[in-house]
Amino acid sequence: MRILVAAIFGGIVMFLWGFVAHMVLGLGNPGIHQPAHEDVVISSLHEGLGSQPGVYILPSFDPNKWNDQAARAAYAQKSLTAPYAWVVYLPQGGDMTNMSRELPREWASDTLSALVLTLVMGLAAFGFAKRMAIAALAPVFSWLSVLVPYWNWYRFPGAFAWAGLVEQLIGWLLAGAVMAWWLGRGERKVF
């Protein structure tokens, strides 16, 4: 029960920190820019991408043609001069100001993440300092395994990737402090 309560506390702290990080500090915005001619881009999406929702990388290359040297050479040449884009495409659109579906999913994600971290923190009779070290290492691990590859392979802006590390590290240190405190109540071991 102690782990579950700590996870709920951690999920709440992380959810609230996410609000502060995105809405007050703007940590979700580095590297994201407004298009010069948004209506032109939007009007060309339906024609260029069709009706299939998904992620599109432009210029595009069919992975089934990887062994076709001529196709690879043509793609390599095109990619040297063509603009690059990584597009999450929803052809049907949606009200981006209505977060009634996203906010509960985010809270659930934060709470489930907190549960996993709390389980790791509670595996042994670690003291507060070791639990905080775990809380610091977990977001660094996830940043190195998720956002750094997105920066590397999909060319996400470096500022976006670094802001992600700051957001996750501070958030999980705050949530980790609450979870470590809750887990350690009544324990004598400090380190």
Image (tube, grey):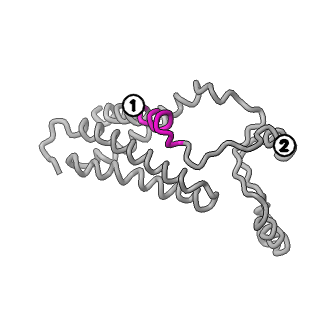
Residue, far right: 47
Query: Quadrant location of residue 118?
Result: top left
Which sits earlier in the primary sequence, circle 1 or circle 2? 1
Disc 2 marks a residue whose amino acid type is Ser
Find out whether residue 32 is within the magenta segment: no
Residue 28 appears left or right of 133: right
- CA–CA distance in space, label 1 to label 2: 41 Å
Residue 44, disc: 2
Instruction: Identify the residue at horizontal 47%, vertical 34% (top origin).
Output: 24
Q: Nearer the viewer, residue 67 or 82?
A: 82
Across and down, in percent, residue 84 comes to 73, 57
* Pointer 1 residue: 12
Disc 1 marks a residue whose amino acid type is Ile
Across and down, in percent, residue 1 comes to 29, 32
The magenta-colored residue range is: 16-28
Is any atom of residue 59 visible in this view? yes
Residue 102, disc: none
